[in-house]
Every structure is written in structure tokens, then in C-alpha cells.
Image (tube, helix red, strand yellow):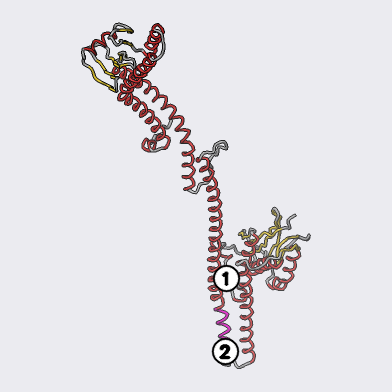
Amino acid sequence: MKIKKIDFKKSKQSIQFRLFVAMCVSTMLAILLTIIVNTLISEKVYIYSKIKTILDTSKTINEYYNTTYTSDDLNKELRNIETKNSVTILIKNNEDETIYYGNKEIYEAVENEAKNFAHTTILKKGNTEIKSVQRGNSIPYIILISTLDNGYKLYIKVPISPLQENVKITNRTLAIVGIIMILISALVATFFSKKLAEPIIQLNRITKKMAGLDFSEKYSINPNNNSELNEIGHNINVMSTQLETTINTLRENNDELERDIEEKLKIDEMRKQFISDVSHELKTPIALIQGYSEGLIDNVNEDEESRKFYAEVIQDEAIKMDTMVKKLLELMKIEYKERKFNDTEFDLSKMINDEIKRETVRLKDKNIEVEFTEKKPIKVFADEDCIEQVINNFFTNAIKHCEEVKSEKKIIFRTEKKDNKIRLFVYNTGKKIPKENIKKIWGRFYKEDTSRNREDGGTGIGLALVKAIMNNYENEYGVKNYENGVEFYCDINLKSI
């Protein structure tokens, strides 16, 4: 089992980790602040609350003595005040006689005050004074000494609990509660940080893919959530779709531009090749025409028969040049896709028979037997002129290279149906084409037998023209060597049903 390595450095920088830390630290700071506040101001708050209590009690008692309460009712109210506010009350009249006291402890406080026992004055206002008293290990207390409106002396004592111990206990309790809260916060922070970080992580992943031109992933939008992240996700989805469309359009335009440039370069190369080929092929006939015409001008041969021969040579070379140029122009139009192909349905069998009839004289002169056994019409669908050129080129090529092998000197036409096409075969007895020349024969001006005289040599354009026509139809063509000869073939379309 392969263990996945954790990148701690990367994890520390993640939003999920930062949210988790922020929530945990916030909880810890809140608890720490509570402990500090409890330590620093709890005692002051406690003392303030006690002072407020005895001041309110003093005011209430003064109001009681300003009313028509009976002695018993007044004592009852004073006991209620003591119970309710956890204080002890002592009241003396104008003759310094005690008319009410809560318990004996109040006497001790009054005696200490009378003896001016060690104390700290907390508040002194008018005829009211509040003191804080600490005597030995006894519980400290606060005492209020005040003179009522009727001249009575009022003492109110309230004990002060040992605050420092209470603060320590409270702080310990807060610390325990804090640890529990931190653990709970950690769990809650893990859950919520994951929930909060998930859409951000998803957006980060999507934008990374977009940077790499991958627009396959889209943000999952929650229709019940109207948060800013949902809106950002929607905007990123829209931007991703628009970018994908734009980039695809740019790619298509770029591909088209590249094809146009490639086509232009190809056409330029073909033009250069055309000029080079024409220049090369026209050198010989032009030289012959120039030479024989100069001979005629200079009267090299004075007799009529010689001058006629010179003129016939010039005429013959001019006809060959005209034929070659016409074929070249036809080839270039097809290769440049400038020639329009007018496809019609016609009888291939009749076209082959017509070609055989046209070459009857040459076939007899060369003693070549032609075999074509197909009697029924073969309906094909193509440009009739182009297919006629293909058959003519295959046939004339077969006549030129047909030789006697094992007492046979023949050319065979045959056809086969293949899918929605007719495959035409033209076979002639004779020598095989060398393997290294099979690809070369389809090029312009290629002549396998350079020793042939000019009369039988041809232009070297015929098979290049066949190749261009077949490429236009995207049909197969080729040549095969057999033991006794060579067979050329090509596909011709049938009419689609």
C-alpha cells in the first residue's frame, strides 16, 4: 500500500488550516481574557456591589424612620432587610442607647469603630462614612456609619468573603471549562473550516485547470445559497465557458490559417517545380526548332527534300511542345483545384472499347493483342473527360511498354466491383518496373526508359495526371508487378443510390 506524503508546509498555508487555527486561537484568547478580567477587576466589582448594597439599605432605613411605622413593624422590616441583603444593622438613639441590633457581632464592629481600630476609609460623604476593616485572621468586613434624619446613629455591617481564594477557584474553573471549550472548538472548527474552505478549494482547483487551458470542471452551484462564493463560482463558470469557446475558435482559426499557409507554400512549391520542369523539358524541342530553323535560314540544304525534312522536324517538335504544355496546364489546374469536375453517369465499357478502336493501327503495327471481355454496360459516375484521360494514359503507357513474353504480346482490360466503386485494371506483358522506381513513375516528366527515341518517349506527364485525378476523388490507384508483365489500376465511383 502506497502511503501518501503530506506536505506540511503547504498544509499550513491552506485556508482550511488557517480557519481552524483562527477559531481555536479565538476561543483560547476569549478564555484567557476572561481569566485576566476576573483576576483584575472582580474584587473591585464585588466591593462596589457591597457598597451599593449598604448605601441603598441606609437610604431605605432612613425612609422607614420618616414614616409612621410602629416599633414592632419597624423591627420586622429591619430583620427583612438584614435577611435579604446579608447585612447586620445596629441603631442608637439620641441618648446613645441601642434601640435595635441584629446580632452580637455588630457590637464588636461598633466597639472597634469607637476605638478607632485599624481601618481604611472607602467613602466619606456628608454624614455617611464607609470603612473597610481587617482584624487578624477574622473575616474582613465593611461598615457604614451614618446619622439618620432624626438624629439616630446607624451602623450597617456586611462581611467580605476572601476574594483572592474565590478568584483562584473561579480561574481554575474557567481553565477547566476553557480546555473543554478548546476541544469542542477544535472539533467545531474542523467541521466549519472544512465546510467554509471546500468551495474556495474547489474554486482554486478550477482556476488552476483554467490556467492550463482545461475547462472541463465547473463549480457546483448551490441554488439555495446566495453567498458571495456562489456568485464568484457562477462568474467563473461563465468565464470558463466563454474562454473555452474563444480559445476553440482561435484554435480553429489558427488551424485554418496554418492550412492556408501550408496550401500557399505548397502552391508556391508547385509553381517553382512547374517552371523548373517546363524549362527542363522545353530545352530539347526549343534547341531542335532553333537549330533546324537556322539551317533553313542559312540554306544549309539547298534541295527541296532536305528543306521539307527540316520543316517537318520543326512542325513535329512544335506539336509535341503544344501537347506537353496543354497536358501540363491541365495537370496544374487539377493540382491547384482550379478545374471543375462535372460528374455525370456514363458507360465505362463503351469508353474502353472506343479507346481500343482509336489505337487499332498502332496495335497492328506493334502486333499487340487486346483483350476486353466485358459486354454489358458498366455505369460509373465521374467526370467523363478526366476518366477518358486516365484510360488513355494507362492504355498508351501499356502499348509503349508491351513486349512479347512466352509467345504472348497482349494488353488486358478488366474490371471488378469493390464497395461502391469499380476498379479498372490495365495489364500488359513485358518487363517489371524496378521496385525503387514504382513511386517515381507517378511524378512529372519521369521516364523510366531514357534510351527510347523521342517518337515513342511521350511527355512523362500522363501518370502524374492520373495521380492528380484520383487524388481529387480520393480514390485508390497504383501498379503491380507480375511474372510476365505489369498491371496498373484505379478506382472509379458508382452513382450513389
- Chief secondary structure of the magenta span? helix
Residue 347's quadrant in the figure?
Answer: bottom right
Q: Nearer the viewer, residue 139 or 321?
A: 139
As shown in the figure, which amino acid type bears the numbered disc 1?
Phe
Is 293 included in the stretch rendered in magenta? yes
Q: Which residues are magenta?
A: 283-295
Query: Mark 2 or mark 1: which comes first in sequence?
Result: 2
Q: Is residue 401 above or below residue 154?
A: below
Q: Does residue 177 appear in the picture of this structure?
A: yes
Q: Is residue 112 left or right of residue 336?
A: left
* Pick the front one: 214 or 384: 214
Relative horizontal placement of residue 123, taking residue 483 as reference (left or right): left
Label 1, residues with CA under 10 Å away: few <14, some 14-19, many ≥20: many
Q: Nearer the viewer, mark 2 or mark 1?
A: 1
Residue topped by disc 2: 295
- Residue that mark 1 sits on: 445
> Which quarter of the figure is the C terminus placed in?
bottom right
- Residue 104 drawn at (x, y percent): 29, 6
How many C-alpha atoms fall within 10 Å of the one at disc 2: few (<14), some, or many (≥20)?
Answer: some
Q: Tell whether position 441 is magenta.
A: no
